[in-house]
Image: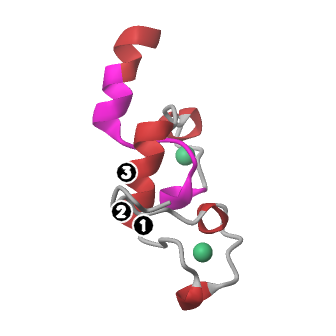
């Protein structure tokens, strides 16, 4: 874990459930989490319909360039 220099994101934090705050050993960095989400997860269909209330902590990608890319495959 962490041997390759990658930051482990806090899965609890992405779900808004981390109670460890600053003492948490995992990353709470929004940019890291958003990047991770857009790389690992599919696009957010709620976001496409303007109905996503999860914002930056959404488990799915809100990256519009990523959405356009996947849309070419799906749509
Ligand atoms: Zn945490
Ligand atoms: Zn979303």
Asked if the stretch drawn in magenta spans residue 60, the answer is yes
In this rendering, the answer to whether 67 lies above or below 53 is above
Q: Is residue 32 visible?
A: yes
Q: Are marks 2 and 1 in contact (CB under 8 Å)?
A: yes
The residue at the far bottom in this view is 23
Q: Name the colouring of the figure.
A: secondary structure
Under tag 3, what secondary structure?
helix
Q: CA distance from mark 3 to mark 2?
A: 6 Å
Among numbered discs 1 and 3, the one appearing first in the sequence: 1
Asked if the stretch drawn in magenta spans residue 15, the answer is no
Q: Are marks 3 and 2 in contact (CB under 8 Å)?
A: yes
- Residue 35 - label: 3
Residue at the spot of label 2: 31
First to last magenta residue range: 54-69
Side of 13 where 64 appears, left or right:
left
Residue at image position (42%, 67%) is: 30
């Amino acid at each position: 874990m962490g041997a390759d220099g990658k930051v482990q994101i806090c899965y609890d934090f992405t779900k808004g459930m981390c109670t460890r705050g600053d003492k948490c050993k995992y990353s709470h960095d929004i940019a890291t989490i958003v990047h991770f989400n857009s790389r690992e997860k599919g696009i957010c269909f709620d976001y496409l319909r303007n109905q996503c209330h999860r914002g930056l902590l959404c488990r799915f990608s809100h990256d519009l360039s990523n959405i356009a890319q996947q849309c070419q495959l799906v749509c």
